[in-house]
Amino acid sequence: MITTRDLTKRFGRTVAVDGVDLHVREGDRYGLLGPNGSGKTTLVRMLLGLVFATRGEIEVLGQPVPKRVREVLPSIGAMVEGPGAYPNLSGRTNLALFDAAGPGGSRRDRRKRVDEALERVGLAGIDRRPVRAYSLGMRQRLGLAGALLRTPRLLILDEPTNGLDPRGIREIRDLLAELNGEGATVFLSSHLLAEVDALCTRVGVMDRGRLVVQDELDDLRTPTGRVTVGTPTPERALALLDGRVENHQGQFLTVRHDDPGTLNAELVAAGVTVTALAVERRTLEQVVLDATTTSADRVEAGR
Amino acid sequence: MVRTVVAAQGLRRWALVLGLVAVLAAVPVTIAVWPAPAAGVEPATLRARIAASGAQAYHGYAQSTGLLGLPALPNLAQVTALASGTTEMRTWYAAKDRWRVDVLGEGTERDLYQTPQAQFVWDFGDNQLTRIEGDQPVRLPRAADLTPPELARRILTTAAGDRVEELGGKRVAGVEAAGLRLIPASADTTVDHVDVWADPGNGLPLQTEITAKGGSRPVFVTRFLEIHFGAPDDAVLIPPAPRPGIGYTTTTAPDILGAINRRRPVALPAALAGLPRRDAIAGLSAAGVYGTGLSSVVVAALPGRFGGPAYQQIETYGQKIEGVDAAVIATGLLSVLAVRAGNRTYLVAGLVGTPLMQRLAVGLAEAPG
Amino acid sequence: MIRVELAKLFRRPRTYVIAGLLCALPFTVAVFLATTRIPPPPGQGGAFLSAVLSNGTLYPAAAMALVLPVFLPVSVAVLAGDSVAGEASTGTLRYLLIRPVGRSRLLVAKLVSLVTFVLFAIMTVLITSYVTGLVLFGVGTSAAGVTLPPDVTSLSGVTISPAGLVLRLLGTVAYIVISMLGVAAIALFLSTVTDSALGAAMGALAVLVTSQVLVTLDAAAAIRPYLPTRYWLAWVDFFREPVLWRDIERGAGIQLVYLVVLLGAAWANFLTKDIAN
């Protein structure tokens, strides 16, 4: 769905995006992680033909961008860096105007399309109030509705849950999963680990303009070589596994061991009751922390 | 840095726009510098054709520009504006006694109609229509005198004795005009030369430039910006009819000089500073013309009421003449002299230098009141 | 896209506020003129102002002369300066572009919307000032109560028939719309350069003020015919008899040149511009 090769963008002397080879496959729920200022938004804008690359190639839905971006944009629903709406008009009018501005979509069922999009994002009951009076969350939902107007094959969403409360975040997550189930590819960028962790199947991590990690989420969460063991008699287990226990907290032990099966057999053979046994895997946070260097908004003392 | 496809596109677009600008800018420049072929008309022949061009009907748009820098004199502001500013005119000319000249201002207009019966002046600013009856033996200069044909013919007639040279052709209002240069012989005049470009066929002057002595650029230029030969539409030559809502007067003396001439006849001396007074037209008493050719001057006697303020104005802006109650404004081309003698003020104007004006001042101060 | 731009134009309260302000100026002037009956001295003040006291039907022309030099260009500059930069700052520009709306089409739609605004504003001023003129000055009744013919006096003194007046006013409207094209193009171009709507409007006004100053300066006579404001008042020539087309033609030509060049510059700049803030 999306492929970039050596994609680079400079603004003057600063390099915003540096040699990115992005690869999003059909049906993916792709999460692009990275701190603020790591180049996520610039990358998204380049995919949509809003910002022109300094170097490299982009292919979206099989077409080169920006050369033939106008052919693919009708099949893309996007939200870029916060919602944009005419503040003096109502949400419904805003959607109708955006719908009318682009090609395709007949005039007759515009009303229906707008109503459906509003329904999907949970704004079915909005009145004629101007967008000026909307809360940030409502605007965010409206922006999402705008992206859904034309039942897109590809959703490109930049920070889609910004400004939403936890319930709203959950609703949007469910909506995106539902859309993905209906066949849409979802590409979203976020600086929230939990959001990506909860929704995405594939993850990319940006750091200072570079794409430092890109893989299946499951493959990233590799076993750490440790096993968590729960037992009502931790003293006996400690005595048995002397030297291999890294941590002991109440009835739980963290044991350095490659194979939970043999560990279990060993414990049971020694007569230790095992109530819980789990392979410890790397968290997404660790993946990100390992891949990135320093926080982008941290300002070090002069060197 | 690698030049990207988009950057190259941007450069191409800018190049297209800049190319367009260059083409558009080149159009007026090319038209201006495109050489006009020489018409190959003998200056004497051209002069004769110009003199006979009074029969040529035309209509057009003319512009006169004076760089004389004359201060506004009381009651004479309309005259001094002609010499110191730009005047835009529309003219329609069918015959010597049937023409119209509009002086255009921003949001206003002052039109002069000549019909076989009378002259009419319409002034939009004053909302006033004036019918001028009878001859005007003496009057102030007006815009209609400054259209290229009128000015060129007047100068060439006045300077009948001075020689003319051939001048290169010039494109004026789209016509490839033939040029001639008049060089006055008199030492008294401030005029170095007068250039006239006229239609080589019918002799209608299209541009007239006066250059003063010591100057490199003409100080007075009048030219057509648009010219169409042929009789104008009859309807435009019919003056507006008097009707309720606009002012209407009939007069025989439309300007201050005419009024003075009618009310206060004065005897002017038969000669001044060695210049003989030219034979005046019947009815002319308040003003006289002295000298010949371009070095001739006009002398007018003003009563105290008008003369006093005029004298003060000229004294303020001009230079005092030693020994007599007189001051002169010399603009390089036109000089204006004011002389106070008794309760009378003499105003002298001409295209002459200060030395002659000083002699005239002495002569007028000694003239019998 | 043009329909969308027009919908945005006429759904914005701002449009009506500006049109209302444009109507308010001639109305205020008319009220003062009608109550005091002191006409401006001939050749000074706005064109036609002294003439309207005797005939109210000429007041639309006087109203044009009042709003044209400052009010109308300022409002056009403000709207045009806002057209792209304003969309960029509300964030709607990027959503329009990924709809997708072609960038060239967007520029053209913006220009059409501006022209529509000028037309709308002028027509409002014409209608309100016509009514104002009729109510406050009446048709052909002067202060002394003397009945005058309903004909309107042209600058050249001859009368203009009511049908002729309507034609000339229509010509005036068309010419003023064309006159505003230059301003609109300058501000539109600047609007694609900067993200600040105010900056674009100020830039366009700076160009206009400079041009206005240079028009009156004799030393700048060489470039005078090419200044954008040089022929702005040429619509007055519609009220001469016969109509003086020279300046009207030149004014329209100059405006079209400015339009083509600056729209071209806006196009060259906007089509490869990064939409980022």
Image (cartoon, coloured by chain):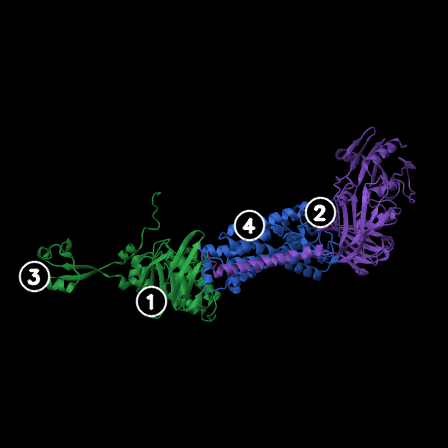
Chain colours: A green, B purple, C blue
Image marks 4 and 1: residues in contact by CB distance under 8 Å: no
- The residue singled out by tag 4 in the image is C203
Which callout, 3 or 2, points to the residue nearer the camera?
3
Disc 4 residue type (three-letter): Gly
Q: Is residue C81 above or below residue A97?
A: above
Query: In this view of the protein, which residue sits in the foreground, C54 or A245?
Result: A245
- The residue singled out by tag 2 in the image is C43
Disc 2 residue type (three-letter): Gly
Disc 3 residue type (three-letter): Ala
- The residue singled out by tag 3 in the image is A270
Residues flagged by tags 4 and 1 on a common chain: no
Residue C124, can we see it? no
Query: In this view of the protein, which residue sits in the foreground, C71 or B158?
Result: B158
Report which quarter residue B229 is drawn in. Answer: bottom right
Residue A73, can we see it? yes
Say what secondary structure mark 4 lies in. helix
Say what secondary structure mark 1 lies in. loop
- The residue singled out by tag 1 in the image is A28
